[in-house]
Image (spheres, coloured by chain):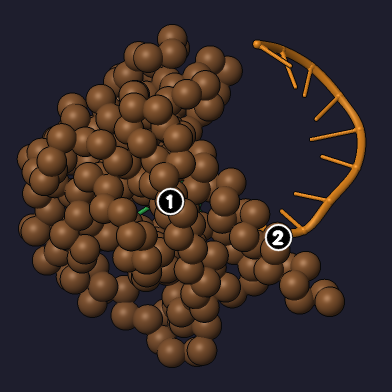
Chain colours: A brown, B green, C orange
Amino acid sequence: MPKTPTGRPIDLKKLEALQRRLAEKVILEDRFKQPIRVVAGVDLAFLGETAIAACVAVDYNSMETIEEAFFKHKLKFPYIPGFLSFREGPAMIFAMKKLRVKPQVFLINAHGIAHPRFLGCASQVGVLTGQPTIGVAQRILCGTYKEEPKEPGQWTTLTYKGRTVGALYKSKKGSKPIIISPGHKTTLKTAIKIVKKCIRGHKLPEPLQKAHRQANKEKMRLMEKMER
DNA sequence: GCGACAG
DNA sequence: ATCTTGTCGC
């Protein structure tokens, strides 16, 4: 049986039950409060057992940064495939809540419903915050697809247990496709449309590209602040 | 039983 | 994810 960093045993069966219950609350319909004007990216960097979460809000049309928020958090759960939300979810939510501007949607570096119990970290964060979320990952956790998209702009659906849970999207030549899946309050179709519009030459959509870069910068500052 | 396995 | 040198390609 796995344990937390402090040695407390983890009951995965119980957490699976929680995921199945929360999965019923996922809304797979577009429910943005306003036309999309601001979209935020959420990603983390790690320094030992500490997570540095970065939430970067950008203008949906220009992809220019509007605001950045960070949150340092001591990890209280190990990495276990299928249970990523319990490890990274808290830090992500704290960073999202520090943002003063209110994005219409959040892009999260994790899967949405493309998950064994249809509740990846992006979906769980969406349900817990009530915010629209989209999962963007670089590797498949579960599911199958027909053919890998080869040309930038193309995509193929990802299926799991008879359900279309996401899509493999070729965002850049020379790079493996990214996996897009609805997190909460959005359809796959809209999720693809939004991510597509956020691609600006990088493999990852700009909000996530920026969040990833900022999380690491913050981590570096933290490192040098320690050795002096 | 054997592999696969988001970040 | 992180540890890590050099290396190939746009």
Whole-percent x, y for residue A91 in the image:
42, 68
Q: Residue at x 51, y 89 (%)?
A: A6
Q: Amino acid at mark 1?
A: Glu
Determine whether, in the image, residue A207 is placed left or right of residue A133: right
Q: Residues within 10 Å of mark 2 (few under 14, many from 20)?
A: some
Q: Quadrant of the N terminus of chain A?
A: bottom left
Give the number of the mark in front: 2 or 1. 1
Residue at mark 2 shares a chain with residue at mark 1: yes
Q: Quadrant of residue A174?
A: top right
Disc marking residue A220: 2
Chain name for mark 2: A
Chain name for mark 1: A
Q: Is residue A84 above or below residue A59?
A: below
Q: Amino acid at mark 2?
A: Met
Q: Is residue A125 above or below residue A156?
A: below
Cα–Cα gap, marks 2 and 1: 20 Å
Q: Along the line of sight, which residue is nearer the eye, A15 or A124?
A: A124
Disc marking residue A67: 1
Determine whether, in the image, residue A175 is placed left or right of residue A107: right
Residue A48 visible to the viewer: yes
Q: Residue at x 41, y 86 (%)?
A: A9
Q: Quadrant of residue A188?
A: top left
Whole-percent x, y for residue A8 in the image:
43, 89
Q: CB atoms at circles 2 and 1 under 8 Å apart?
A: no
Determine whether, in the image, residue A127 is placed left or right of residue A39: left
Whole-percent x, y for residue A201 in the image:
52, 21
Q: Residue at x 30, y 41 (%)?
A: A38
How many marks the image carries: the answer is 2
Q: Is residue A5 above or below residue A79?
A: below
Which type of secondary structure does the marked residue at label 2 adopt?
A: helix
Q: Along the line of sight, which residue is nearer the eye, A40 or A10?
A: A40
